[in-house]
Amino acid sequence: MAHDRMLQFVDRTQAYPDKRAPDLRAEDFREIADRYGVPAAEEQAGRCSQCGVPYCSVHCPLHNHIPDWLRLTAEGRLREAYELSNSTSTMPEICGRICPQDRLCEGNCVIEFSGHGAVTIGSVEKFITDKAWDEGWVEPVAVGPARGQSVAVIGAGPAGLSAAEYLRGNGYEVHVYDRHDRAGGLLTYGIPGFKLEKPVVMRRVDRLKAAGIVFHEGFEVGRDATLDDLRRRHDAVLVATGVYRARPIEVGGGELPGVVAALDYLTASNRKGFGDAVPAYDDGSLCATGKDVVVIGGGDTAMDCVRTAIRQGARSVKCLYRRDRANMPGSKREVANAEEEGAEFMWLSAPAAFEGGDTVAHVRLRRMRLGAPDASGRRAPEPDPSGDETVAADLVIKALGFDAEELPRLFGAPDLGVSRWGTVLVDGRTLMTSLDGVFAAGDIVRGASLVVWAIRDGRDVATAMHKWLKAKAKAEKVAA
Ligand SMILES: Cc1cc2nc3c(=O)[nH]c(=O)nc-3n(C[C@H](O)[C@H](O)[C@H](O)COP(=O)(O)OP(=O)(O)OC[C@H]3O[C@@H](n4cnc5c(N)ncnc54)[C@H](O)[C@@H]3O)c2cc1C
Ligand code: SF4
């Protein structure tokens, strides 16, 4: 690469003299960064063209001010970059790690469109926020003057935690109820530690505890209290319980030992990572070490199972998906990662039966082909007459996705309005459910989605609840 172009790059990275798109390629920047020791985050941030229409921000569910904090990063003003990124997100370092950026911010970067590879926005976001934690720039939650009103949040996943943080900031007493023994929802027990290190989640939870948010862990609404009990105890209630009903596979042999649900498998692995005693992991029922593993499904949960099994030292890992590569729902990047790590994908394959003796020993699979498009416009898979095949399996992990549990029944609240998929219905403007003072957010409203959307929903619902609670306090004052 020409020397003057190198200097031009170094100049831009350090001083950011103009805001035009550099015409260098991603590999050029990497070469320069290595050669001159320019920090990778600042180098990447310096590639942002500051284009007039920030498509990246538009496609980020939080509408983060991406070009602005990239510019600050490129200028070496890391604390300001962190503060700006933190102003729209309660968990920027978590999103930086696990957002499917190829479908959101980075997938809409104009430099990507021009064929030069997107600015790696997520890794810059992770870097500046991790740096902020290391440097002590992350401030305690600024708690507003006490309002004398309290709020119950059911579910300590990203939606519940984000709402709790904003509501506490507005001076409410906040109680978070979760059936697990640790907060974090799927951040803690679903997403594997190699994608999201657990101390990163726990330090966020600890910050909320330090702000006076009261966590009731091991508290299951439906078992330990009804929804009405919580409505009586608090001025408002937020339902942020996520979706946990695993979609079934209707084939024979599903009851054989060795055929397990994805979330049981991932939770055991995550608990082990925390150092918990996990008998089902230790006795091998939820552990892949030395086994022939077959994962069924084509979404991100399936990819997490595949990659966890590889890390646990499985003898072989196969992933069965009934459509082809182009039609799978999971992130292409995750598939590429899994393949690179040694997983074998069996496209156009569906399980026909799980077979074995005392435990599962094989999966009989049916070859599929893509037929005419279904109602959703996707080509529906149908059995291929070429016949069945058998693959060895001593651990089968079912990862077909999740639906909502039956909340009206579980919560003893038959009047809680839900859709035909079981997701909780909310008014689009007030975000309130069919029950007065009961709001809902996150996956339980959208169906299985993404962490960044849960954070966005938590932010929005906190604003809506604040408005409603202020009106309630005013009405009570007038009545008194
Ligand atoms: C294996 C897996 C991997 C994923 N990977 C990614 C990823 O890489 N990137 C990404 O963006 N998204 C990912 N997702 C999706 C993401 O985790 C969810 O969209 C997000 O966590 C939803 O947040 P939430 O707060 O709505 O619900 P959750 O995170 O599910 O939290 C809900 C909480 O409610 C609690 N709860 C439920 N019922 C009750 C009750 N009756 N009483 C008390 N507490 C209750 C649960 O214990 C849980 O803690 C993944 C999902 C899975 C399953
Ligand atoms: S929150 Fe997610 S989509 Fe938004 S900038 Fe960060 S990584 Fe991109």
Image: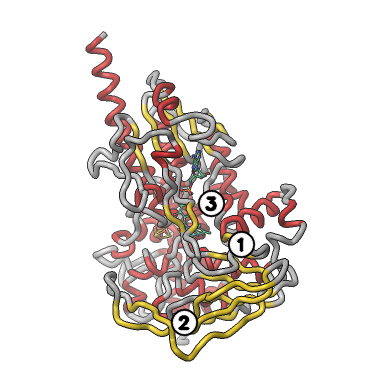
Q: Label 3: state its secondary structure.
A: helix
* Res. 255 mark: 1
Do the CB atoms of the residues marked 2 and 1 lie less than 8 Å apart? no
User: In terms of image quadrants, where is residue 355?
Assistant: bottom right
Labels 2 and 1: the sequence-earlier one:
1
Q: Amino acid at mark 3?
A: Leu
* Res. 187 mark: 3
Mark 3 burial class by Cα count in 10 Å: few <14, some 14-19, many 20+: many
Q: Which residue is mark 2?
A: 348
Q: Amino acid at mark 2?
A: Leu
Q: CA distance from mark 3 to mark 2?
A: 31 Å
Mark 2 burial class by Cα count in 10 Å: few <14, some 14-19, many 20+: many
Return the x and y of residue 259 as percentages of the image width and height.
62, 64
Do the CB atoms of the residues marked 3 and 2 lie less than 8 Å apart? no
Which of discs 2 and 1 lies nearer the camera? The answer is 1
Residue under the point 41% across and 54% down? 452
Q: CA distance from mark 2 to mark 1?
A: 24 Å
User: In terms of image quadrants, where is residue 59?
Assistant: bottom left
Q: Which color mode does the image show?
A: secondary structure
